[in-house]
Image: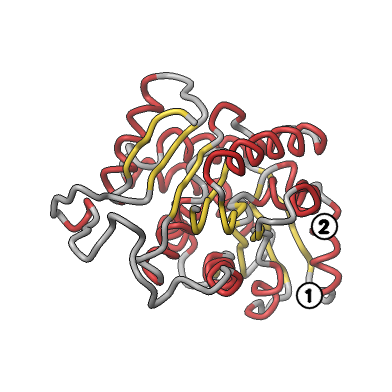
Amino acid sequence: MTDFVFIDSGIGGIPYMTTLIKRAPEANCVYIADAANFPYGEKSHEEVVECVTALVQRIYDKLEPAVIVVACNTMSVNALDVLRAKFPNVKFIGTVPAIKLAASVSKKRRIGLLATHATCENPYNIELKNKFASDCTLINRPDPELISFIEHNAFTASREQCLKAVRPAVDFFKEKDCDVIILGCTHFLNFTDIFEEACGPDLKVVDSVDGVVRHALEVHVGGVAGGEPPAGRGSEQRSASEGESSPYIYPNLYTTGFSDESEKKQYDTLCARFGLKFEGLF
């Protein structure tokens, strides 16, 4: 059985997994990027549900997951209810825009949501806004071009190129007089420090990483923190980022496809940076 499987349309869920591993290094984790179906944010509700359900069925059959972290806002707001009904033996943790957190820190009561078209247009966000930020103005910005840039260039582009890529979104929310930006697509979390630098002190950046990881650890049956390492993954294990070799580098990362060789390079760089073992196609 696999403790945690993280799924996303690409690299978006990586920050959730790396954060969880820091808090529970003995957890057995697998990451699956459904790159063959990228981008999810431009699909219809029915297409999202169909793609995610098919992916989770393969995961269920091959990996016996205890917990699946749906590390994609678009997948979560469109398909979580279907997944929980179809796979009752699996615990699903969704990721949704951090509207509640944004409302708790906004002084101007003007909040920006940066996300995919599918997330911005989903009625669930209106429910979250009405429940947790009824006195705030919520300003949406779908940004598929930035999401695509991050998916294909996040780990190979220079910092200057990354800052240039996020500035149109940051300038948009500054012009709208927002004082908080919600990173409502998990791809953006790979650029949290880039966004913070571009935003400066007057525009706060919020996301759902801490809450999602805490909840994932809470719902795991029996818990993992403080337990024994998975078989074959002992205290000799080190991540590649620590500069030490080990026969056991985890978690494992799979993808459902590559569009070209440049995308393969992106994943090679990602795996080297975070100490992931690339296992090929899923």
Closest to the observer: 183 or 275?
275
Asked if one can make out residue 203 in the rendered structure from this viewpoint, the answer is no
Kindly identify which residue carries mark 1: 132
Local crowd size for mark 1, using a 10 Å CA cut-off: few (<14), some (14–19), many (≥20): some
What type is the residue that disc 1 sits on?
A: Phe
In the picture as drawn, the residue positioned furthest to the left comes out as 244
Instruction: Judge from the rendering whether residue 22 lies leftward or rightward of residue 103; answer left or right.
Output: left
Q: Is residue 36 above or below residue 241?
A: above
**What is the x, y in percent for residue 217?**
53, 71
- Helix, strand or loop status at disc 1: helix
Quadrant of res 196: bottom left
Numbered circle sitting on residue 109: none
Residue at x 38% of width, y 77% of height: 226
Figure quadrant of residue 253: top left
Q: Dot 2: few (<14), some (14–19), or many (≥20) neighbours within 10 Å?
A: some
Q: Could you say where residue 140 lies in the image, as x and y percent from the top left?
A: 73, 53
> What element does badge 2 sit on?
helix
Query: Three-letter amino acid code at disc 2?
Result: Tyr
- Residue of label 2: 124
Residue at 49% from the left image edge and 25% from the top image edge: 257
Relative depth, front residue between 35 and 84: 84
Q: Quadrant of residue 220?
A: bottom right
Q: Find out whether the residues at labels 2 and 1 contact each other: C-beta distance under 8 Å.
A: no
